[in-house]
Image (cartoon, rainbow, N blue to C red):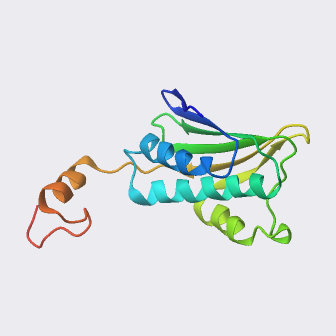
């Protein structure tokens, strides 16, 4: 299992549920300039989509993360597998469906029954370098600077 990198994309094939752990690690590195909240949302969506294909018995699947927009201000996560269906609450996907509706600006299914993709779009928020500098030098979170600190 090897990561396939392009400047603004990461692609990985999931052959087994345990592959999701390595995917999470790769995704966190791919999004390392983003806020913790953005990375957390992306990882939750990845887990939800990977769970959907696993629960439907549609492995192997290909997952692709693409930074889109003029400033890479959107993340598109798409998971392609043969015959994968859109998650629904009726199919026992209640928590995953909640993750998609909470974390993603848009989500859905594309393609025909032969090869379909589940996808989600998330807004990307990059971390402010100045705030990170303050956090690292003073050991505090960027939004919790000591009183009187610039």
Q: Residue at x 85, y 52 (%)?
A: 85
The image quarter in which residue 77 lies: top right
Q: From this viewpoint, is residue 104 visible?
A: no
- Report the residue that reaches farthest toward the right: 113
Q: Residue at x 70, y 57 (%)?
A: 51
Q: Is residue 48 left or right of residue 150?
A: right
User: In the rendering, at what x and y percent does residue 89 appear?
Assistant: 80, 70
User: In the rendering, at what x and y percent does residue 58 appear?
Assistant: 81, 47
Q: Is residue 4 left or right of residue 98?
A: left
The image quarter in which residue 64 lies: top right
- Report the residue that reaches farthest toward the left: 148
Q: From this viewpoint, is residue 37 visible?
A: yes
Q: Residue at x 48, y 47 (%)?
A: 25
Q: Quadrant of the N terminus?
A: top right
Question: In the image shown, does 130 or 94 lie closer to the viewer?
Answer: 94
User: In the rendering, at what x and y percent does residue 83 appear?
Assistant: 88, 44
Q: Is residue 127 above or below residue 140?
A: above
User: In the rendering, at what x and y percent does residue 102 appear?
Assistant: 61, 66
């Amino acid at each position: 299992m090897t990561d396939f990198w392009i400047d603004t994309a990461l692609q990985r094939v999931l052959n087994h549920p345990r592959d999701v752990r390595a995917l999470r690690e790769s995704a966190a590195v791919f999004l390392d300039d983003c806020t913790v909240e953005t990375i957390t949302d992306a990882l939750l969506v990845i887990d939800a989509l990977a769970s959907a294909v696993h629960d439907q018995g549609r492995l192997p699947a290909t997952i692709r993360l693409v930074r889109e927009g003029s400033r890479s201000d959107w993340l598109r996560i798409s998971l392609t597998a043969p015959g994968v269906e859109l998650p629904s609450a009726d199919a026992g996907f209640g928590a995953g469906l909640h993750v998609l509706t909470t974390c993603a600006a848009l989500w859905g299914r594309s393609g025909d029954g032969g090869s379909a993709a589940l996808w989600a779009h998330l807004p990307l928020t990059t971390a402010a370098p100045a705030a990170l500098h303050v956090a690292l030098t003073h050991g505090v979170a960027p939004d919790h600077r000591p009183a009187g600190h610039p």
